[in-house]
Amino acid sequence: GLQILEGKGMPTGNDTVVKLAILGWCIEWLQGWLLVADDFMDDSHTRRGQKCWYLLPDVQKIALNDAFLIEMIVFKVLKRHFSAQPYYAQLVDLFMETTFQTECGQLLDTLCLNLGLNDFTEQR
């Protein structure tokens, strides 16, 4: 990331490095909350070789709320660290659009749960 900025003659000081790291964490949390929700909806058993979060005895359905909280962390961190930036609205929109597209895909996935192979026709 820094080499791209340097190549464009943009600042690459500590503040920039910190902002890039924060943005990286927000991307990880975005993927994380979507995966927690996906595992729950798909009745998955493992994620990256480990038992899914919702399958832990003291978590179960709490995992759904955990997913929502992780999602909110993303937007609270973006607000705290980027709200004064001129690109803040675009950044939030990008995260929201990514979430929307992922949720639409998840909807298509779950709509197929009650269908058999014969239901997938050319008309459908």
Image (cartoon, rainbow, N blue to C red):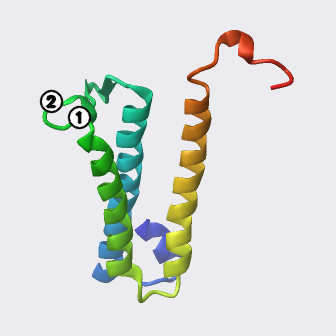
Residue 60, numbered label: 1
Place of residue 30 in the rendered image (x, y in percent of width and height, measured from the top left): 40, 54
Residue 90 sits above or below residue 31 on the image: below
Could you classify mark 1 by the number of other residues whose Cα lies within 10 Å: few (under 14), some (14-19), or many (20 or more)?
few
Q: Residue furthest left?
A: 58
**Would residue 35 be visible to someone looking at this image?**
yes
Where on the picture, by quarter, is residue 45?
Answer: top left
Label 2 sits on residue = 57
Q: What residue is at 42 percent from the left and 46 percent from the top?
A: 34
Element at badge 2? loop
Q: What residue is at 35 percent from the left and 54 percent from the top?
A: 68
> Given the image, on which type of amino acid does mark 2 rest?
Pro
Place of residue 55 in the rendered image (x, y in percent of width and height, measured from the top left): 24, 28
Which sits in the foreground, 94 or 17? Answer: 94
Place of residue 119 in the rendered image (x, y in percent of width and height, measured from the top left): 73, 16
> Given the image, on which type of amino acid does mark 1 rest?
Gln
Give left or right: position of 73 versus 30. Answer: left
Element at badge 1? loop
Give left or right: position of 119 versus 46. Answer: right
Give the quarter of the figure containing the C terminus: top right
Residue 49 sits above or below residue 70 on the image: above
Q: What residue is at 45 percent from the left and 68 percent from the top?
A: 3
